Amino acid sequence: MWRTGFFFHEMAFGLLSIFIPIYVFGITGSFLYVGIMTAAALFLAIPASFFWGYACDKTRRYKRFILLSFLMMTILLYLFTLTSSITLLIILYAIVSIFHAAHEAPKNVLIAESYPREQWEKAFALYEGYTEAGWLIGLLLGFFVSAYNISSVQTLLLSSGLNLIAFILALIFVADPVMIFERRLVTIERTVDFAHKGAFIASKILDGLSVNEKLKKENLAAFCSGLVLFSLATSILFTPLPLFFSRTLVLPTSIVFAIYVLNSGGGVLTYLFASGRFQRHETYPPIGKTVIFRSLMSVLLIATTQASGYTVLFPVVILILMGAANALFAIFTLTLSMELVPAGKAGLFNVLVGIGAAFGSFLGPVVAETIGFALVFTMAGIIFLASFVAFKLFA
């Protein structure tokens, strides 16, 4: 039941994910302002993520940060309805990103501390699937809002109201863990396993036996680099993508929402499948396969920019497959981050994702406006490939 508030929060942001870029473009007529607004918000979210992660682990209180996040979302989204000044909107959106980050690290810790390590993959898959369903319903709301020409003010009020519901439900159902030790146990377990493997290899060498095993410690820097690069590529691709559908392919806003509903649906189905079937990986989960698949899908989007007749079906299929690949990537990396990141630095995962997203959210719209979407898709594919290399070095 504690996830219910997050469901409504994701409904609001599923709606806003498509509405905000189109809303800002409608006010300014420029991709550039979309990039500036998103990048400014994400850059401010980077130190905020680290701070919230440190604060919740330091105080060992997680519910208060989740409540703060949902309450501030309610207030700030209401303030959006009071102005159409692009400067004020950029400032408000930047503040939104700071408080939006306040619930991310606490909810990751809540999941990790509420389940034994063997169930982390299933637990993260269940949470992500549940909230992704909320995101999908938010996209459906956006479809109906645009189809029935609901005003921008009413749309923002709807998003604010959904966050108010999220706050009330979190107040009722979210509770701090009674005991907080699972992540420390996992850290001890990994250290002991590494020492045991080293002793085993050493004993075989001393006995004159051949050794095929390798004693290799994880390359944490490579893991962090892979996260940043994956986030960078995703943001370069997805920040201007709603505008590609609405402006380049000249699709109605309601159809753009419908396309993203299908993208989100691919993720929901994958999360549901994963929550019922995933087991703990004995070595490392196949992160690289999901990343290389995203790279291929990004490059294939170039075909949709050809002048000889546009078809919506091809990019829709690609986005559905991308949604599925992103779901697997989220499960694998969230689980590993809880193993690798020490207590007190729970916000590091969101910091790394935020760094890539901040740069990508600015680069994507700028490149799209100045050069074109073909280069956007190519850049994303190449950077996904670089992320794949980093994850291979990690393990």
Image (spheres, grey):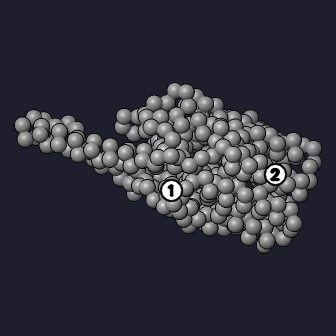
Which residue is at 71% across, 41% downward?
134
* Front label number (1 vs 2): 1
Circle 1 crowding by C-alpha within 10 Å: few under 14, some 14–19, many from 20: some
Left or right: 59 in relation to 270: left
Q: Position of residue 198 (x, y in %)?
A: 20, 44
Quarter of the image that includes the C terminus: top left
Q: Residue furthest bottom?
A: 87
Which element type, helix, strand or loop, lies under badge 1? loop
| Residue 247, x across and y down, in percent | 81, 52
Question: Residue drawn at (32%, 47%), measured in percent from left and top?
Answer: 188
**Disc 2 packing (10 Å; few <14; some 14–19; many ≥20):** many
Q: Residue tagged by mark 1?
A: 60
* Res. 79 in view: yes
- Residue 344 horizontal side relative to residue 146, left or right: left
Q: SS of the residue at dot 2?
A: helix
Please, is residue 40 above or below residue 148 in the view? below
Mark 1 vs 2, N-terminal side: 1
Q: Provide the residue designation for mark 2.
A: 161
